[in-house]
Every structure is written in structure tokens, then in C-alpha cells.
Amino acid sequence: MTIDVEDYFQVSAFAPYIERSDWDRRECRVERNVERILALLAEHRTQATFFTLGWVAERYPQLVKRIVAEGHELASHGFGHERVSDLTPKTFADDIVRTKALLEDLGGQEVLGYRAPSFSIGQTNLWAFDTLLEAGYRYSSSVYPIQHDHYGMPDSPRFAYPVREGLLEIPVTTVRMFNKNLPSSGGGYFRLLPYALSRWLIRKVNTVDQQSAVFYFHPWEIDAEQPRVAGIDAKTRFRHYVNIERTHDRIAHLLSDFAWGRMDEIFLGRKVKALGDMSQPATQVQLA
């Protein structure tokens, strides 16, 4: 279970409408939304991985410390939600080194994981994996093996694989159907599709592929009261706001229907002190 810790005004789809220089003037709601997520995870005795922006960590250091204190993994989402495809090798290296150091200083634990904003590692910038390895990361979750208008590498492996010696790529989960990889692991697809279908897709990965599913969502996706951004096009409005009022309850159902865990524990075999009884295998389906 993974959470990309960013606020509503930082999503890539809003970049044409909201200047980065305006971020500090926007109503920031990430703190209260992450608090709700932490309560939800505690209720379901679940540990997760929080891919956290350095921008958020710098402004809400106590929130970062809460994430770690409650037994969750702290990982990097870069500093300012800039797509890797928009950065040079030098600016990308500066970004991931800066963010890793900041998160480790605040959280007091080693940061091993990185997720590129908007899954923006693809065929044109595979050099980013070398940079991540050099910066001390052990895994990335930055490639989405689907065809999408903003990102995606549909021919890449669907499940965790070594991209460099010492570095794993752990893709967000897809289901193979109709000779295509179909999204089955969060974001707008989870809000758009009926919950029963999303549950079926994840169970298919567990039972047919016999793999753990990697699911992701954002704090703003459980916030139906967030300020509406004016002047956006209809496609962006639909993608961002569709079924947003239902996401909190759907996440609660997901936490009840499956057992989840931290990325570092599941894929790196890293053992940390758990909250409560985490004896079930990660993403094992719980029979009703």
C-alpha cells in the first residue's frame, strides 16, 4: 500500500493552471488529509509506504515524524513534483539527493525508495536509474507499464525486476487482459471503476499471477471539500474530481478485503518493528 504525499495544487495536470510560485499562497490541506489516512491505516492495523515530497516535508516536519513513529516506511517523491522527463541528469541528481537527506534527517530512518512524479521514467530517460543507484536508493516505483497520454512504458515488465545491480524497479500493478496491460492499482482508475471490479482485478493478480499488488493513492483523493481549481479543461476536471467523495470509504474496503504492507518489507525483505499483528502475508486475500 503506497501513498503519494502531495497536495491538490501540486498535481501535474494542474501545472498549466497553477504556477509553482503560487503554491505557498494556496490553502494547504495535505496535513489534515494525511492525518485521516494515518487514522484509517491504524484502524485496519496496516503499515504502508509514504512517497513524500520534500516540499511537504520541509513545511510539515511533524507530519513526517508521525508517519515514521506509526511504523510506516518513509520514501521519496522528489522535492517539488517535477517530472523526471523535464529535468537534466544534474538537476535530477540534485533533487533526489536533497530530498533523501531531508527525509532522513526528519524521519531518522534510511530512505530506500523513490517514486517519480507522474511515473515519469521511461524509454527516453533510463539514465535516471543510474542516478538513483548512485544516490543510495535501493528501489524505484517509477514505471507504469501501460499506454497513457501522459506517461507509461507498456512493454516493460509488470512485476518487480532489477534495473541495475542493487536497484529494483517495482511497477504499479496492472492486469494482463485482451493482450494489453490494464490499470488495476489506484489513481483515477480506482475512483472511476466500480469498487467490485477493482477488487476483482487485484484478486486476479494475487491468485493468477501469484504476485503482491502495488496500490497507490493521494491524500487529496479523500478530500471532497478541497478548493476547486477554476478555469481547468473538462478532461482535467473529470480526471481529478470523479468520485472523489467515495474514495475514503473505498480505501477502507480495500484495507478490509486485503492485507497490505510496506514496500521495503515486501520487496527488500527489510524487517522492522510492526504495529499489532501483521502475521498475514502482504496482499493475501481475506476470505469472507
Image (cartoon, rainbow, N blue to C red):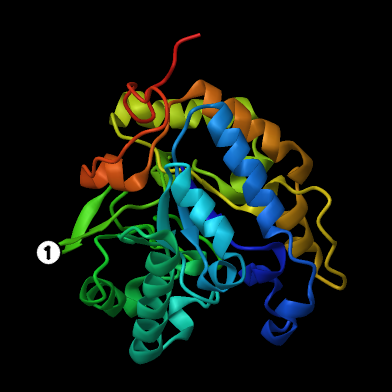
Q: Quadrant of residue 48?
A: top left
Residue 255 position within the rendered picture, expressed as x and y whole percent measured from the top left:
53, 29
Q: Residue furthest top?
A: 288
Q: What residue is at 38 percent from the left and 76 percent from the top? A: 96
Locate residue 8 relative to residue 205 in the image: left or right.
Answer: right
Position of 99 relative to 277 (above/below): below
Residue 219 position, x and y percent, is 64, 52
Residue 49 in view of the camera: no
In the image, what residue occupies the spot 73% across and 78% down? 24
Q: Position of residue 118 (x, y in %)?
A: 52, 66
Q: Quick check: 185 left or right of 224? A: left
The quarter of the image holding the N terminus is top left
Residue placed under numbered mark 1 in the picture: 165
**Percent position of residue 98, x then y:** 40, 79
Callout 1 secondary element: loop
Q: In the figure, is residue 173 to the left or right of 186?
A: left
| Viewer can see residue 165 | yes
Q: Residue furthest left?
A: 165
* Tally of numbered discs: 1
The three-letter code of the residue at mark 1 reads: Glu
Q: Quadrant of residue 266?
A: top left
Q: How many residues crowd around disc 1 within 10 Å: few (fewer than 14), some, or many (20 or more)?
A: few
Q: Quadrant of residue 75 in the image?
A: bottom left
Give 81 or 47, whichever is nearer the viewer. Answer: 47
